Image: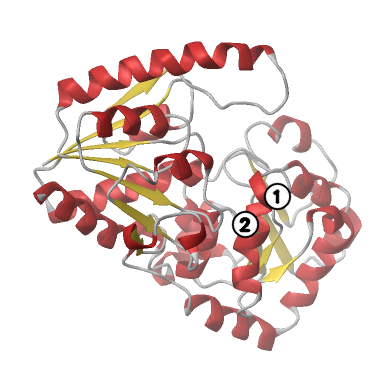
Amino acid sequence: MKVIISGGGTGGHIYPAIAIANALKEIKPDADILFVGAKGKLEMEKVPKAGYPIEGLWISGFHRKLTLRNLMFPIKLLSSLFRAGKIVKRFKPDVVVGVGGYASGPLLQMAVAQKVPALIQEQNSYAGVTNKILASKVQKICVAYPDMEKYFPKEKIVFTGNPVRKDISDLADLKMEAVTHYRLDQNKKTTLLFGGSLGARMLNEAMEQNTKLIADQPDVQWIWQMGSIYYEEFVKCETAQLPNVFPVAFLERMELAYAAADVVICRAGALTVSELCIVGKPAILVPSPNVAEDHQTKNAMALVNAEAAVLVKDAEVKEKLVSQVMELMDDAEKQKTLTYNIKALAKETAAKDIANEIIELSKK
């Protein structure tokens, strides 16, 4: 069986794609899988590290404001459609899979034009533009949230949940390795703060501006992921020098970070929310306001309404976040409730279920 998986741009698209590929390989070890991504984007680094070949398209997003980059968009789109058509003809896939992101549009457009069966995977509670455009042309649409009929044809929808990395499903035995890896004190409570693969300025500024409150609670230690683009700016600040704060640019071993944490603070991207459900740790979500249709707030509210997470608005993060953490650390009953309720929302077989849908499509 030959499969092309296309998309990327952010970790939220790439890691589910890799999880789907891994699940396919478990069921069909001889499956031939090719990734197609956008040149210069994160997938061109992460996919080969995961052991899969990838080809790049010259494509980027369309900005709402008039910019020089937008003038290049039609040229990039035509170039990507032409190259995507050549890749499909050469590779001859049985199925193509789109996970969202820049490259999935041109690749799936050219694949369906060549009558190749197609499946898309929508991670968010709000459908992305590319997936909405492709919905009428594909055979299956795997979703992670209920009520997606407002975006997609009901008969094509399969509720699978979001595929997540397999190494986070059982963290119990990793606690001591995590303590050693991050040079933590095993007798202290640990807060994990991260802003996605690139980091989040507002979360970093909340840490920077709450030095005294963090210093006054030495029994709570912090793993502070600043993000590669913000690390140099924030690593020199006073908070980062505190003995109970451990700053990092990027979390290479995400499973260890989760294993170490008693409380997690993060954005509310779809993949992150799905991982938190599997991990089952008390979480404080700070939805990013800089996303289409405020979909991170919608993602977060799915947990908040189930009493499975705490929400702090981005605009209030500097004033409220650290005090909310300290409050939650002192409330064992609330931690227990959040843990129980968030675990109840987990969809642990998502990657396998999507892989089975792909296999079924290949038979047709």
Check the picture and name the quadrant holding the N terminus.
top left
What amino acid is labelled 1 in the image?
Answer: Ser
Q: Would residue 346 appear left or right of 250 to someone viewing this image?
A: left
Q: Which is more toward the observer, 219 or 130?
A: 130
Can residue 262 be seen here? The reply is no
Can you say whether 281 is above or below 195 in the image?
below
The secondary structure type at the circle numbered 1 is loop
Q: Position of residue 19 (x, y in %)?
A: 33, 50
Q: Would residue 60 appear left or right of 106 to someone viewing this image?
A: right
Q: Which is more toward the observer, 59 or 192?
A: 59
User: What residue is disc 2 on?
Assistant: 268
Q: Position of residue 273 (x, y in %)?
A: 54, 61
Instruction: Say which residue appears at 60% left-offset and 76% top-offset.
Output: 308
Do callouts 2 and 1 mark residues in contact (Cβ within 8 Å)?
A: yes
Residue 188 has which mark?
none
Can you say whether 112 is above or below 79 in the image?
below
Q: Earlier in the sequence, mark 2 or mark 1?
A: 2
Q: Which is more toward the observer, 323 or 286?
A: 286
What amino acid is labelled 2 in the image?
Answer: Ala
Instruction: Say which residue appears at 18% left-offset and 49% top-offset.
Output: 25
Residue 288 has which mark?
1
Can you say whether 234 is above or below 259 in the image?
above
Q: Find residue 213 and report its image quarter.
A: bottom right
Instruction: Say which residue appears at 24% left-offset and 17% top-offset.
Output: 86
